[in-house]
Image (cartoon, rainbow, N blue to C red):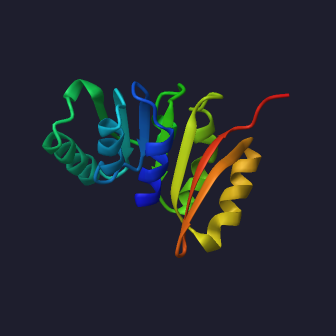
Amino acid sequence: TSMCSRLIEKDLVPGHDCLDIGTGSGILMIAAALLGATALYGIDTDPCAVDIAGTNIRNNNIPDPQVSLECRTLDRTPIRPFNIIAANIIAQVIVAITGDIEKRMNNETVAILSGIIKDRLAEVLDALATHHLRVIEQLMTDEWVALAVKKMPED
């Protein structure tokens, strides 16, 4: 989470919107709001996580009109580009949803992927390449990896 937050801090421009996939406690949405994101979209498959994220967002005085929280999967989220996409989830899930992440990116979008154990990094990199995504930054702490990725330029 700390590596993901560092990458959000580096890549988020005030006024951006942010999609947080697997929002959990909502900490990344809160970080994005504090950095100036004006629209926050959080999804999680666990209704308890969505409730907790909502409580944490309210407790941090993030205005309701900025926030959309849904209990849903990424494939059931509207297909439109976001400025920042964060997914702090396990590598296997990142691999499975890489195509759905790519569908919500344009050439300016930065997707921040973390929760990747070093032993699973090759699988994530293969999935990224398959979906024409490239790593622009990689952070590593102990056994954990976080990646910032963008679409590959079209020829």
Q: Is residue 98 left or right of residue 38?
A: right
* Residue occupying the point 70% across, 57% down: 125
Q: Position of residue 76 (x, y in %)?
A: 47, 35
State how many labels appear.
0
Of residue 83 and residue 48, the one placed in the foreground of this image is 83
* Residue occupying the point 63% across, 69% down: 120
Q: Position of residue 37 (x, y in %)?
A: 37, 31
Residue furthest front in the image:
10
Q: Is residue 20 left or right of residue 138?
A: left
Q: Is residue 45 visible?
A: yes
Q: Quadrant of residue 35?
A: top left
* Vertical order, 31 against 41 (above or below): below
Q: Position of residue 73 (x, y in %)?
A: 44, 43
Of residue 100 and residue 133, the one placed in the foreground of this image is 133
Q: Is residue 1 visible?
A: no
* Vertical order, 45 against 32 (above or below): below
* Residue occupying the point 49% across, 43% down: 10
Q: Is residue 22 left or right of residue 10?
A: left
Please identify the quadrant where the N terminus is shown.
bottom left
Q: Position of residue 79 (x, y in %)?
A: 53, 27
Of residue 125 and residue 44, the one placed in the foreground of this image is 125
Residue furthest right in the image:
155
Please identify the quadrant where the C terminus is shown.
top right
Q: Is residue 72 left or right of residue 101?
A: left
